[in-house]
Amino acid sequence: MDEVKSPKVSETQTDFRVSWQLFKSNYKAFIATEIFAVLAFIIINAIIIGIIVLIFYLAPNLEVADLNPRTASDVKITFRMYGLIAILAYLTMAGFLYSQYGLAYDIFSSGDMFTEFKKAFSYFKSHWWKYILLIFVTGFGFLIPVRRIGENPPRPISDQAEILSIIFMVFRVVILFVFLVLFSATLPSVTAQGNLKNSFVESIRIVKKDYKRLLKSWGIYFIIFTLPIFAVSLTLTLLMPIITGTVWVTILIILLILLYAIKLFIGFPMMSLIATRIYNTVNFERFKPLVEEKNTSKRE
Amino acid sequence: MSSEKDMEIDKGTSIKDEFLVTDPSAVPVMFHNKKNLILKLLIQNEMTIIDLKHKTGMNPGTIKRHLNDLLEFNLIYISREQISDYGIVMKYYIATAKRYKFEMSWP
């Protein structure tokens, strides 16, 4: 008699199923973290723009088009300062978003199997500079594989520069995926053991140990959350000369915003949970964990 | 360096028959409604925070705070930590004893 065997569930399937279940039961903490980060970013930018407007209001002689070399230089400095502060605000926002790895750590590794929004602040406080530095290697900096939308007038696609910009877009997506596979474990690692250098060592150890699972899990993640953004963006780029002035531009832009929202509110928490699960379940040589449990067992 | 197996800590699940409470500040902790409910459940069985959430309907964060208070006075302890098949570390709590006896004088 033939034995009925249940289909073998791969680790990749489990990565997604478990992460999705845990995201559903802890979505408030994750969504609150994202909303806080985005709002903080918007508020900081609004404050900076407010200050610039105030400067121009208080000094009406200061004009962008002013030919006076002194005032023109003031304007340039003002806008450069805005740019610098906006970049800092962006990095802070992204760093704060990465404190979601702390939330994922709480769920997977603390033993309590749940997390709270306020914990994002304590993880950000402990690891903020490491999270910000890791933005550059784990892909947040490459997140936007989009060329500037709405260039007016649109250049023809046969233009050599246009082709180069499309090649560059594809290149960025490929690099983003490679970096994701290679360094996705740095964030759960730095949260668990605290050392930035060791997090790279651990990440590479995981790649060596189970690269097939990494390729599969991050490949599927990429197909679900990143490639649609890239596809719509590329469509927009290629079709811009044809569809300029039609409703299709608006439709594609709305679709792009929707895909970004999905990536932000579902994709990022899923990424942190999947990465933390992979980090926890791959059997490799680990460095000593940083966080020691405060409430140790006390028995008489 | 530590391996994954190091995380599987079994601190034993034995429960004493009696525990002598001598610290007066433990009294309000024990007789707080919610903490008392949690303690009663942990006398019956070892449980995780999620188990307690299902049994009491309380928020996990609230349960965690109550557990910390109970741990502070040694009224409960962490009996074991186990990694589930899904790679999740699960911490089990249990009461220190089946019965608590008070012995204190004031002032």
Image (spheres, coloured by chain):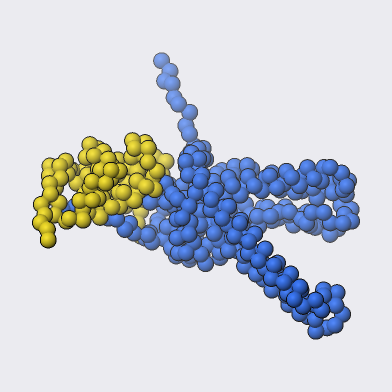
Q: Residue at x 15, y 51 (%)?
A: B21
Look at the image and tell me whether residue A209 can be seen.
no
Q: Residue at x 56, y 65 (%)?
A: A133
User: Who is closer to the viewer here, A35 or A125?
Assistant: A35
User: Who is closer to the viewer here, B98 or A12?
Assistant: B98
Picture coordinates of residue A212 (x, y %)? 53, 45
User: Hey, which quadrant is residue B49 in on the image?
Assistant: top left
Which chain is painted in blue?
A: A
Look at the image and tell me whether residue A41 can be seen.
yes
Picture coordinates of residue B31 (x, y %)? 23, 46
Q: Residue at x 55, y 61 (%)?
A: A95
Q: Is residue B46 above or below residue A168?
A: above
User: Who is closer to the viewer here, A138 or A127?
Assistant: A127
Left or right of A182: which side holds B21? left
Picture coordinates of residue A185 (x, y %)? 50, 54
Q: How many labels, in total? A: 0
Which chain is painted in yellow?
A: B
- The quadrant in which the N terminus of chain A is found is top left
Left or right of A287: which side holds A159? right
Picture coordinates of residue A48 (x, y %)? 67, 68
Left or right of A237: which side holds B90? left
